[in-house]
Image (spheres, rainbow, N blue to C red):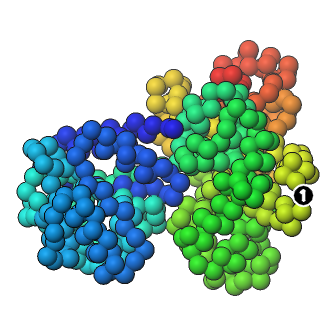
Amino acid sequence: MVVRNTELKKLERLYGENGNRLVVLYGREGCDKEAFIRMFCKGKKFFYYRARRASEQEQRMQLAAEIEKQYGVSLAKYTYTEFFNRIRSGDASKLVVIIDEFEYIAKRDEEFFRAVLKLKAKKLYPGPVLIILASSSVAWAEQGMQGRLGEGCKKIDEFVKLDDLKFIDVVRSFPEYSVSDCVKAYGILGGVSSYVNRWNPKQDIRANICRHILSPGGYLFAEAERFIAGELRELALYNTILAAIAAGHEKLNDLYNFTGFSRAKISVYIKNLAAFEVVEKVNSFETGGWENTQKGIYRIRNNYINFWFRFVYPHLSDLYMMSAEKFYDTYIAQELDDYMNRYFVQVCLEYLELLNMVDKLPIKIYKAGTWVGKTGNIDIIAQDSARNNLIGLCNWSEPQLTYKMCEKLFETMKKAKLKAEYYYLFSAREFDDELLEHAKKDARLALVDMTEL
């Protein structure tokens, strides 16, 4: 299991501070929030309640039953004020109170958050307390909660987000894998910790895909549509839009022509998908070549959902009629390397960010991104505060990164009206002789192979 040290340190700091603290802890479903909470609570006095999708009355009855069981008390009133008045640590130590999936209560019952604020203000349980309101809904924590709780949100001391894992975390989780296989696993699974924890690094990529994704009993077999349906209604419409984007229809007008939905409807549905971090709009790094930039490009942000709609969803009938191995060999094996190009760029950008953190780059990166042009793309543009540029070129699928590729990059940079002081050239395999010779003579060119990643 991946240990989230950064987030643990944040909570430990808040736990160690004097006075009561209120924290919102959140991350997408699959972030292993519950395991993280168990790890944090180890050795501490705590009360944990997992909220249900239930009516106000049923919710209060369930919470009351758990308080009565844990503390051996009988409750006369089924109010949140009474509930928080009866919890205790039993000594002078700080009590940790966790209400998990708290949005199921807060959306229905206004008294809940008022009681939480009373608890924080020491108007109920008098001892020191750290209150953690946890949620598996990113959209609720980042957007919906403010509208529901209003000014009370200002009383929250800190928001702690359990983000998707980074590539380096995947590498650490799979010590048996080569870097190349780690890139493939990351491109398929993304950084969802529950997916990573169930992947078997003692088996190769093909075997894991067949077992977990292509087999009806696999953990990820129906995960893409299950995740979408768990957050959004009208799955049929969302499936149609996601299938269209995965097939290369990445502009609003293309989606309109392909799906037959109105532009207004598509915009609304894409906005909803973006709120749950499923889809994103690709914004090119700002350069002078705006007229040569592609605008209004949408892509599937979630790695696993992208994989499912790219390789599996279009061939769903064969998925049920073929063996998993035959399906993989027929529909995935030949195209997987091309598919991974995009994720190799993400890995290379993360590598630069790590070097930047330890001051191992020739510039201090202030902002970074990509540039999507009408006739060519620039994989990575990293810029410092003085607008000095470092350009990254990433080759995953070709046998060699060649000097001709660099020349094509230089032409694209002209269209982007962009100049650079430094170039980082990443290749998953080799560099051609011509490029190796240029790199010896030109100090601006840094060649990075897979062993360094």
Residue 216 position by quadrant: bottom right
Q: Is residue 198 at least partly visible in the picture?
A: yes
State the residue lying farthest toward the top.
Answer: 440
Residue 308, position in %: x, y?
73, 58
Residue 390, placed above or below residue 309: above
Label 1 sits on residue: 322
What's the residue type where badge 1 is placed? Met
Residue 418, placed above or below residue 244: above
In the displayed structure, does residue 356 sit left or right of residue 123? right
Residue at 45% x, 55% y: name it: 27
Mark 1 neighbour density, 10 Å: few (under 14) some (14–19) many (20 or more): few
Q: Nearer the viewer, residue 226 or 302?
A: 226
Residue 386, position in %: x, y?
47, 37
Residue at 37% x, 67% y: name it: 51
Q: Is residue 335 at least partly visible in the picture?
A: no
Residue 197, position in %: x, y?
58, 42
Residue 350, placed above or below residue 283: above
**How many callouts does the rendering have?**
1
Residue at 26% x, 78% y: name it: 110
SS for dot 1: loop
Residue 146, position in %: x, y?
33, 70
Q: Nearer the viewer, residue 145 or 31?
A: 31
In the displayed structure, does residue 367 sit left or right of residue 446? left
In the displayed structure, does residue 87 sit left or right of residue 132? left
Q: Quadrant of the C terminus?
A: top right
Residue 370, placed above or below residue 112: above
